[in-house]
Amino acid sequence: MLVHIPHLLSEEEVRHCRAVLEASPWMDGAATSGEQARKVKFNLQIPVESKEARDLGDIVLRALGRNPIFTSAAMPLRVLPPMFNRYDVGMKFGAHVDGAIRPAPGGARMRADVSSTLFLTSPDDYDGGELIIEDTFGTQRVKLPAGDMILYPTTSLHAVSEITRGSRWASFFWTQSMVKDEGRRKLLYDMDMAIMRLRRELSDDHPSVLPLTNIYHNLLRSWAEL
């Protein structure tokens, strides 16, 4: 399941993130990758422990907390602190799969179920740099406006195509979902979106809304792992 979340960050928030990143130190992105990914990863990142990464990560996390689409699609139990990368001309990330278990703050570990890429650069500012995602839904090439985010299963093979002009900046992170199974998570998301449409088109107290809401929460109660 791919889910596009438009306008996760406002234009002002994007400008602020870009200004902070422009003044930040950058390092080889391969330093934070596993052995397999390191061989095909050619980009830059700001250090994950830097103040800039923490401050900007807090902005992203607050935006996630106020976004109902992210909550519905990811069913977040734990969200890793967002990281920030850039791809300049000639840089790319070959096909790879993200690690199933990720280190979390405080020495803990978490399962990665949902991957997210938040675009911080206008697509007109660079050529190439598409996020290429391969899964049961086929191959998708994603290049979104600044402030928009894409969610996709961490189980997917994915890549970033080579930059041939300009520079592509983004934030990326992983989420452990309360609902581990991707198929169940999709069913819940589709049902939640349908209930939201009913509420908009009919009313909250329409006879169809309450029974569907009850079914949704009972399914979530059965499938959630806390």
Image (spheres, helix red, strand yellow):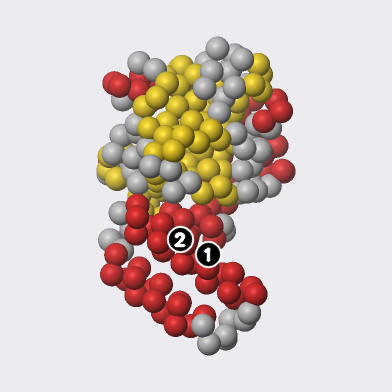
Q: Residue at x 58, y 49 (%)?
A: 5
The answer to whether residue 47 is visible is no
- Whether residue 136 is situated above or below residue 72 in the rendered picture: above
* Kind of residue sitting beneath label 1: Met
In which quarter of the view is residue 56 placed? top right
Q: CA distance from mark 2 to mark 1?
A: 6 Å
In which quarter of the view is residue 18 placed? top right
Q: Could you say where residue 136 lies in the image, as x and y percent from the top left? A: 38, 42
Q: Answer few, some or many: residues within 10 Å of disc 2's Cα (few below 14, many 20 plus, some between 14 and 19).
A: many
Q: Could you say where residue 132 lies in the image, as x and y percent from the top left? A: 49, 31
Image check: 223 left or right of 14?
A: left
- Whether residue 58 is situated above or below residue 133 in the rendered picture: below
Q: Residue at x 62, y 81 (%)?
A: 203
Image check: 150 left or right of 167?
A: left
* Kind of residue sitting beneath label 2: Tyr
Image check: 34 left or right of 23?
A: left
| Residue named by callout 2 | 189
Q: Answer few, some or many: residues within 10 Å of disc 1's Cα (few below 14, many 20 plus, some between 14 and 19).
A: some
Residue 193: mark? 1
Image check: 121 left or right of 81?
A: right
The answer to whether residue 217 is visible is yes
Q: Circle 2 sits in a helix, a strand or a loop, which is it?
A: helix
Q: Are marks 2 and 1 in contact (CB under 8 Å)?
A: yes
Q: Could you say where residue 6 lies in the image, as x and y percent from the top left? A: 63, 48
